[in-house]
Amino acid sequence: MNPAAEIWPSVMTLLEAELTATAVTSWFGDAKAIDLKEDQIVISVPNQVIKNIILSRYLPQLKKVLYDLFAAELDVLVLTTEEAEKYKANNAGAKNENILIGSEQFTFQRFVVGSCNVFAYNAACSVADHPGQSYNPLFIYGDSGLGKTHLLYAIYHKIRQDHPEYKICFVKGDQFSNELQEAIRTKTTDQFRQRYRDKDLLMVDDIQFIAGKESTQEEFFNTFNNLHEAGRQIVLTSDRSPSEMSRLEQRLKTRFEWGLMADIQPPDYETRCAIIKNKAIMLGLDLPADVLEYIARNITDNVRSLEGTVKRLLAHRDLMGQSINSESASRAIQALIRAKDEYTPSPEIIIEETAKYYNMDPAVIRGSTRTKDVVLVRQISIHLIRTITNLSLPDIGKVFGQHHTTIMHSLDKIEKQLKEDRSLSEIVRDIRSNINSRSY
């Protein structure tokens, strides 16, 4: 996993608000983030001309958006493609797994505690203070955007501070599965196991993505047992409880429930007010009380939406010179709701996310291969495109190079399977969730 590459799309989105579309396309369109350290981001660009332009004209704006994203000052190292290759060679193998770049702001001190999350918060604090002793595993679950990952990061930073000698591994559920499949393909499963089983702390975000994957569940079962028997701390998060994962093996459900399960609910009004105020302070924004209360009354679903509204208000003030009042807050909320409602992923994104879930090349899904596994994944992609987008059957057919009657047949077949197979319905739910998360 490359943290730099993962955050680069967010950097580009913020740059689009600072620069003209022409400037972004011309000078940053081919830029790539290749490394991210605690105090520096490293960017690769095609040639010396682009490098010089970015450093001479756009470095302040780039540093500003990095500060907005990380709430910390980051130096920027811009390299040409040739320089980047030398940099990669010199830094090969130097990655420190105990550093989660970009997560420094997610601490216990910055987590807003309310009745909706106090149990999970206290459990996380206890685990951070006494790793491997109090609750093992700690299983935190709840809907997206409620603070599960924040608590994971907070545990990580506290343990890293108190136990700098600890070997810590933070991984996403789908990443664990993809790495295992690659290890099997390259016959490096011993190295894969060593990476996860010699850790003092294993943290898995979105563990639900290992459900239904036989080899992944087998490997994680053995890894879990190995760490648990050695008294090493395990922390897991999920969007649902183990009992709600129909595709999760019973033996894993049992082990996930061995320690402590803590759920997080949507924030109540008082907690929403506190979250908004906390975010405004972090951004240096003085929100009038009536504006704060207006946002808290009208945004009720999750923390991300609350923070997004505050950021939008800040942007309107700084970029448009608009004063912050209930009227501007209303516009920000409506814009946020409209942006989420109007988000329609392209067929390419849907195919990409479906392919990623199954660790399959998107080109294979769009191709003519007729093996059973490929046909199923293709049918799922067709179903999701049909239900999420406004594309007609002939238009969907063009995406896959098929006649619209073939698309219709695929839809009939997959929809019948979804009605009969609960586990397949869960898979589609997970993929849809990943697709929708790209709208944030």
Image (tube, grey):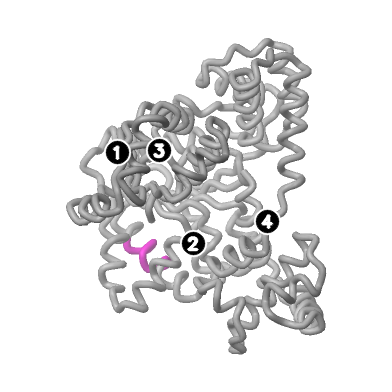
183 to the left or right of 24? left
Q: Give residue 7's position: percent from left, percent from top.
A: 45, 44
Identify the amino acid type marked 2: Asp
Label 1 element class: strand
Front-most of residues 149 and 287: 287
Measure the C-alpha gap from mark 2 to mark 1.
31 Å
Q: Secondary structure at mark 3?
A: loop
Of the residues tagged 1 and 3, which is closer to the observer? Answer: 1
Magenta segment, principal secondary structure?
helix
Helix, strand or loop at label 2? It is helix
User: Dividing the picture into quarters, in which one does residue 346 lie?
Assistant: bottom right
Q: Residues within 10 Å of mark 2 (few under 14, many from 20)?
A: many
Q: Which mark is residue 251?
A: none
Q: Quadrant of the N terminus?
A: bottom left
Left or right? Give the position of 61 relative to 326. left
Residue linked to disc 1: 77
Q: Is residue 92 magenta?
A: no
Q: Do the residues bearing badges 1 and 4 touch, measured as CB atoms within 8 Å?
A: no
3D distance between C-alphas at marks 4 and 3? 27 Å
Q: Residues within 10 Å of mark 3 (few under 14, many from 20)?
A: some
Mark 4 or mark 2: name the one nearer the start of the chain: 2
Badge 3 is on which residue? 102
The residue closer to the viewer here, 172 or 311, is 311
Sequence order check: which comes first, mark 2 or mark 1?
Answer: 1
Residue corresponding to mark 2? 174
- Could you give the CA–CA distance between mark 4 and mark 2, rounded to whole angstroms? 21 Å
Q: CA distance from mark 2 to mark 3?
A: 20 Å
Q: Which mark is residue 345?
A: 4
Q: Name the residue type under label 4.
A: Pro
Q: Give the extent of the magenta segment.
A: 220-226
